[in-house]
Image (cartoon, rainbow, N blue to C red):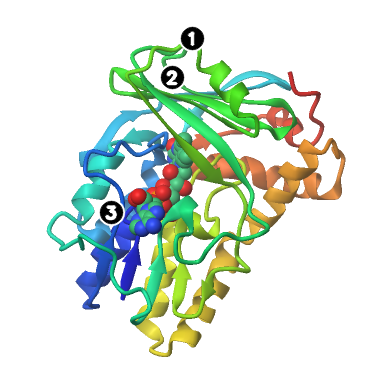
């Protein structure tokens, strides 16, 4: 088997598939000192089980744990919620440690030889671009300062994106993601930057394009990212686990890929509705049946991420948005 891309899902797959007994060639284009563009926030109550299966302890990577989480929006007043596992962790070291004793190839393997996994995230390097793709731009600073000491999310009106401040020890990840890149940049002006990163983030399921020929995608390459919170770390690990389950069971490649695709659609099917809801809000279609149907599911995305959100006031953001400021 070949793995293209050693981010979250690729590193985890390389570790697990090798441990199970598959012969794996893996390759990534990034430099060894590359600082991954990501908030590094996850839910410690959920990621631990993946770490156990990969033979590492998540506690070794936690940087800051949230107690309270502030959620604000252009359409609603600020609320403080309890954390249900939200934390930041050392994602660079985590990915490095998953594969530290494995042999990473120095140049790309022959992706036509056997099964190849496209774990290249936003790039879709093997599967190729999808005509119906949907991404937002995101920029992030590693900064000495932030306006809030707690984990902080601020949602822009009309579902145009959000701004975040996540504690990272005595530093912060401060970032902005949205459709308008100059607006994202403007929001970061008051912050000092030790380091600047950024890339696009895929916020739409591409579950009609999960595999092609001998190639199957995992993680962000196929849109395993919450369209509401942008959470992609645990969804990518989950997609990798679903692939492993099928790889252990089915020898025939078309069968394996189809069973995997069915599992992905079942696990992440809600992303279709959540993505439609975001598009409706952006287009000013407020009281759509989809929005009402998926508003509760949108709140659930926060709970998945580790924020114990309860307020009906936040719910209204997803049903009746006001104009974007
Ligand atoms: C600014 C920002 C902030 C985010 N914050 C969070 C957060 O706080 N919490 C969260 O859960 N999610 C967050 N996400 C989303 C999350 O980072 C991703 O969804 C997740 O890392 C995707 O995992 P992956 O394994 O699919 O791909 P990635 O982790 O993106 O890995 C892809 C890998 O493929 C490699 N690659 C690319 N092209 C090629 C090629 N041609 N050949 C070989 N290798 C290649 C890349 O170098 C990279 O290592 C954020 C995303 C962005 C952009």
- Of labels 3 and 2, earlier in sequence is 3
Residue that appears at 34% across and 39% down: 36
- SS for tag 1? loop
- Residue 320 percent location from the top left of the image: 82, 32
Q: Is residue 139 above or below residue 206?
A: above
Q: Alpha-carbon distance for marks 1 and 3? A: 37 Å
Point 85% across, 37% down: residue: 286
**Residue most extreme to the left:** 101
Mark 3 and mark 2 in contact? Answer it, CB < 8 Å: no
Residue placed under numbered mark 1 in the picture: 190
Disc with the residue nearer the chain's start (1 vs 3): 3
Contact (Cβ within 8 Å) of mark 2 with mark 1? no
The 10 Å Cα crowd at callout 2, few under 14, some 14 to 19, many 20 or more, is some
Question: Is the CB of the residue bearing disc 3 within 8 angstroms of ligand 1?
Answer: no
Spot occupied by residue 115 in the image (x, y as percentages of width and height): 37, 78
Residue in the foreground of this view, choosing between 126 and 115? 126
Image location of residue 260, percent across then percent down: 49, 75
Above or below, comparing residue 235 to residue 176 in the picture: below
Q: Is residue 16 left or right of residue 124?
A: left
Would you say residue 274 is visible in this rendering?
Answer: yes
For residue 76, side relative to residue 153 (left or right): right
Residue 51's tag is 3
Mark-to-mark CA distance, 2 and 1: 18 Å
What residue is pinned by disc 2?
150
């Amino acid at each position: 088997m070949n793995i293209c891309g050693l981010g979250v899902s690729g590193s985890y797959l390389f570790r697990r598939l090798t441990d199970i007994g598959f012969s794996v060639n893996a390759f990534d284009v990034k430099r060894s000192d590359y600082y991954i563009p990501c908030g590094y926030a996850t839910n410690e109550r959920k990621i631990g089980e993946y770490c156990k299966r990969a033979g590492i302890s998540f506690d070794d990577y936690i940087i800051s744990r949230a107690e309270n989480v502030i959620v604000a929006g252009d359409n609603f007043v600020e609320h403080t919620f309890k954390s249900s596992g939200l934390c930041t962790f050392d994602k660079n070291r985590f990915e490095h440690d998953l594969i530290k004793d494995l042999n990473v190839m120095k140049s790309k393997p022959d992706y036509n030889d056997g099964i190849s996994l496209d774990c290249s995230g936003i790039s879709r390097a093997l599967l190729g671009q999808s005509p119906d793709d949907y991404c937002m731009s995101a920029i992030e600073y590693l900064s000495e300062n932030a306006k809030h000491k707690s984990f902080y999310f601020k949602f822009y009106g009309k579902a145009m994106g959000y701004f975040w401040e996540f504690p990272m020890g005595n530093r912060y990840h401060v970032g902005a993601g949205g459709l308008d890149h100059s607006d994202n940049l403007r929001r970061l002006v008051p912050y000092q930057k030790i380091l600047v990163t950024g890339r696009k983030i895929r916020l739409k399921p591409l579950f009609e394009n999960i595999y092609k020929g001998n190639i199957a995608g995992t993680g962000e390459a196929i849109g395993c990212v919450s369209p509401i919170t942008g959470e992609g770390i645990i969804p990518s690990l989950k997609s990798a686990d679903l692939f492993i389950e099928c790889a252990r069971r089915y020898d025939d490649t078309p069968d394996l890929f189809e069973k995997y695709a069915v599992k992905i659609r079942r696990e992440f099917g809600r992303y279709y509705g959540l993505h439609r809801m975001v598009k409706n809000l952006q287009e000013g279609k407020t009281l759509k049946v989809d929005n009402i149907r998926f508003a509760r599911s949108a709140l659930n995305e926060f709970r998945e991420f580790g924020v114990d959100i309860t307020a009906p006031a936040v719910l209204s953001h997803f049903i009746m948005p006001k104009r974007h400021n």
